[in-house]
Image (cartoon, helix red, strand yellow):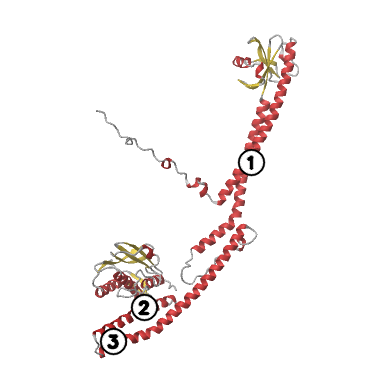
Amino acid sequence: MSKTTPVGSSTASAPAPKSASRRQLPEWLKFSQWSLRSKMVMATLALLTAICFIVGLVCFASMSVVLNGRLKETLLNTSRQVTTYVASGNTNPATYPGVGYGTLIAQVKGGVLLTQPTLVSNVVGSKNVEASDISTIASVEPTDGQVDKHLSFGDYRFIAVPLSDGTTVITGIPTDDVNDPLATLISTIILVSASGLLAMGLVGTVIIRRAMAPLNQLSAVATRVSQLPLNEGEVTLAERVPSSAANHNTEVGAVGLALNRMLDNVAQALQARQRSETKVRQFVADASHELRTPLTAIRGYTEMLRMTEDLSPSGEKSLSRVESQSKRMGAMVEDLLTLARLDEGKPLELADTEMTQLVLETVNDMKVAIGDHRWQLDLPSDPFIIKADAGAIRQVLLNLLSNAAKHTDAGTVVVTSLRNVENNMLRLSVRDSGPGIAPEFQADIFDRFSRADVARSGHDGTTGLGLSIVHAIVQAHGGKITLKSEPGHTEFMVDLPRGIAPTPQG
């Protein structure tokens, strides 16, 4: 029984998409990927090539018309003389006056050669033509007019003239007077054009490179400015386009002048921002110092009230609330003072710090303070000693561990590890198995007062200063901190120099 194949169920493989079958051009062949200098040189060479081609074509056509006209007149005159002498009964071509060297003469009647075609020579008069060319010569008809034929010894132009007795006189002259000058002209045009294009390419490249030099200077200045850390701290924007590339005389110079004006404006804006930030930071530092004493007094009086007064449950609750909020405010003040000291660039108390012991002690303290998390260590057996401020590094680790505890649920695993990394750096990392940090928050996580939670009350509320303090301390040690976070894995990695005293940063 035959099987019917449903329509559209053909087993033939579908043709590959056109885009898949096309071969991608290399980058260097894509005109859009070329530099402006290369485009200008190639455009100039292309224009010059077109001009050379057109000029050469016009010269060749003009020369061809002149030479072919001259050859036509020569053939007509020669044919007229040969026909006259043949009609008078003279059969010796060598005796024909005015017949030039290389002239071919033949007589045909009724399709039959009456005489052997002869080639007039300037040496011995005339000589016979080879048999292989006879049929080609005999094929010339009076109706053909002037016709070119290729013979074994060269190219010829023929004309056939009928006589009154039925005889046809065939006369041919070589086309060397046309072909040789045209070949020489073509060779000359190609040689001169190629030399001109080569010279133009070299000279044009040099000229365009010099003309584009100011653009390179503009690009270099813009690149250096783009690499400056303009987002924070005191910035000195001294980069400017040289005066040779910044003037009103040229288009590129006008761009350079505009770039310098823009940089002046940006520098002024950065200076204004720095002055404003300095005032704000000074105010925060002064306010923090002023708040320290009253906050200490509030905590002292709350403790005194608790010890000396018999409070009702409601009063006890209110007093506890005052005490907890004063402690929270005090912690914020201490954080602000720490940042103020770092901003002032005060030198760190650098000393040989044994990191393994420091990490072990700090994590053990966290186990006691926050027991509902699973605190784990991944430490090497050998001690890691670096030049650092032990108190500041301890605060870095405490802030990272506290951050992990505040933003993860009870039972979350928090692992602290130490290991060597490249460039003689030591990596201190804190990772947890919590829900992770939102991607949109990760870019700003080290900014001051940056908070993922919007609430500012409750025991999990944060000031938004902990990670900014970590960032500032790490930078002051000449290190860096990076974050890698996804659901189920969040890791803060602190890289610190090993064995090299860092330069404090303001």
Mark 2 / mark 1, whichever is N-terminal: 1
Q: Secondary structure at mark 2?
A: helix
Where residue 380 sits: x, y (%)?
28, 66
| C-alpha distance separating marks 3 and 2 | 20 Å
Give amino acid for label 3. Glu
Q: What whole-number distance in Å separates the C-alpha atoms at marks 1 and 3?
A: 99 Å
Q: Which residue is mark 2?
A: 332
User: Is 79 situated above or below 328?
Assistant: above
* Residue denoted by label 1: 51
Judging by the rendered image, the residue that carries numbered circle 3 is: 303
Circle 3 sits in a helix, a strand or a loop, which is it?
helix
Answer few, some or many: residues within 10 Å of disc 3's Cα (few below 14, many 20 plus, some between 14 and 19).
Answer: some
Q: Is residue 501 visible?
A: no
| Quadrant housing the N terminus | top left
Q: Nearer the viewer, residue 460 or 201?
A: 460
- Is residue 324 placed above or below 91 in the rendered structure? below
Q: Going by the image, does 36 lie left or right of 291?
A: right
Going by the numbered disc 2, the residue's amino acid type is Met
Q: Earlier in the sequence, mark 1 or mark 3?
A: 1
Give residue 291's position: percent from left, percent from top: 39, 83
Which residue type does callout 1 highlight? Ile
Q: Residue at x 30, y 69 (%)?
A: 407
Q: Residue at x 35, y 68 (%)?
A: 452
